[in-house]
Image: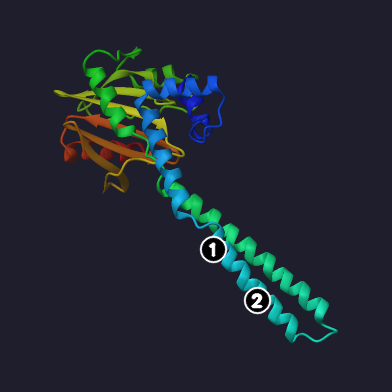
């Protein structure tokens, strides 16, 4: 069982609605996959908090009692020839009130769930893959300093096009790229060298992702999310639904200036 299959069965697993065989497969995957295990623990906490916090029968019963009182009061005040119409109007108000309470409860549920959805660990994964590349455990699948060659190599291999960023002058040298995965998402890796520094780019589809909290910096009209992990500077930016996460041992200011300058030229 892979991450995507486990994710589809996660809620049934939490609610103990899976058959014994499927339940064992999910449990085995969670024991071997730290990312899915983290998401499982987060979902369990969310379900627990929701069950404790969302009002149920008590609030609904009180609302029903108030609505019924208003209906009875209206019926007493109504004349005999308007009674049927008043009753219908009161019934309409009653139904509307119940629907409103139900709608608000559902909206609060999804709002709370969105706010507490576990973030996607793209920064941590990018740093891990960068160190694997430096250690030789993530070899290049296409080695070339020509951006057109590398960009053409990715064509047809992913569901999105890979734009290889070009840097003016000789400050940045393109080394090549390869395919990879960030959890259940296919990504493109691009690797560069600048002097003694090596820089890795992870190009990925970021639609529907909740990213970890990071510092927001704006340079040359472009917004970047910046953080530091394990001694590396991590910079992330998005263009529509595509994202790019960059990892390097360069200092924050130098890396931001390098990236923002190249992006402003290519825009």
Residue 139 seen anywhere in this rendered image of the structure? yes
Left or right for 202, reference 14: left
Q: Label 1 neighbourhood size at 10 Å, few (<14), some (14-19), many (20+)?
A: few
* Vertical order, 148 against 109 (above or below): above
Q: Nearer the viewer, residue 193 or 61?
A: 61
Q: Position of residue 187 (x, y in %)?
A: 40, 25
Question: What residue sits 54% from the left and 22% below the top?
Answer: 20
Q: Which residue is mark 2?
A: 69
* Vertical order, 79 against 242 (above or below): below
> Helix, strand, or loop for circle 2?
helix
Q: Position of residue 263 (x, y in %)?
A: 32, 38
> Helix, strand, or loop for circle 1?
helix
Residue 168 seen anywhere in this rendered image of the structure? no
Q: Position of residue 8 (x, y in %)?
A: 52, 30
Mark 2 or mark 1, earlier in chain: 1
Q: Label 2 neighbourhood size at 10 Å, few (<14), some (14-19), many (20+)?
A: few
Q: Nearer the viewer, residue 114 or 62?
A: 62
Q: Of all residues shown, which one is farthest toward the right?
A: 81
Q: Which residue is mark 1?
A: 59
Gap between marks 2 and 1 measured at Cα: 16 Å
User: In the figure, residue 230 lies in which quadrant?
Assistant: top left
Q: Nearer the viewer, residue 4 or 47?
A: 47
Quadrant of the snapshot with the C terminus: top left
Left or right for 88, reference 28: right
* Vertical order, 166 against 92 (above or below): above
User: In the figure, residue 201 lies in which quadrant?
Assistant: top left
Question: What residue sits 73% from the left and 70% below the top?
Answer: 91
User: In the figure, residue 117 lies in which quadrant?
Assistant: top left
Left or right for 133, reference 47: left
């Amino acid at each position: 069982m892979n991450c995507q299959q486990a994710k589809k069965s996660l809620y049934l697993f939490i609610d103990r609605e899976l058959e014994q065989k499927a339940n064992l497969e999910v449990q085995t995957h969670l024991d071997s996959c730290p990312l899915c295990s983290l998401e499982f623990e987060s979902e369990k906490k969310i379900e627990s908090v929701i069950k404790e916090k969302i009002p149920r029968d008590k609030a609904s019963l009180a609302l029903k009692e108030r609505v019924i009182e208003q209906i009875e009061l209206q019926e007493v005040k109504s004349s005999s020839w308007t009674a049927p119409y008043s009753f219908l109007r009161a019934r309409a108000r009653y139904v509307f009130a119940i629907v409103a309470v139900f709608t608000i409860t559902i909206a609060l549920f999804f709002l709370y769930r969105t706010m507490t959805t576990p973030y996607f660990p793209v920064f941590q994964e990018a740093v891990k893959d960068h160190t694997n590349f430096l250690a030789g455990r993530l070899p290049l699948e296409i080695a070339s300093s020509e951006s057109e060659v590398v960009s053409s190599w990715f064509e047809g291999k992913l569901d999105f096009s890979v734009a290889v960023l070009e840097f003016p002058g000789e400050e940045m040298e393109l080394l090549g790229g390869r395919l990879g995965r960030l959890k259940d998402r296919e990504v493109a890796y691009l690797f560069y060298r600048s002097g003694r520094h090596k820089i890795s780019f992870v190009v990925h589809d970021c639609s529907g992702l909740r990213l970890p909290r990071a510092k927001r910096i704006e340079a040359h009209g472009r917004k970047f999310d910046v953080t530091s992990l394990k001694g590396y500077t991590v910079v992330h930016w998005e263009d529509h639904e595509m994202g790019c996460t960059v990892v390097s041992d360069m200092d924050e200011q130098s890396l931001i200036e390098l990236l923002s300058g190249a992006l402003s030229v290519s825009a």
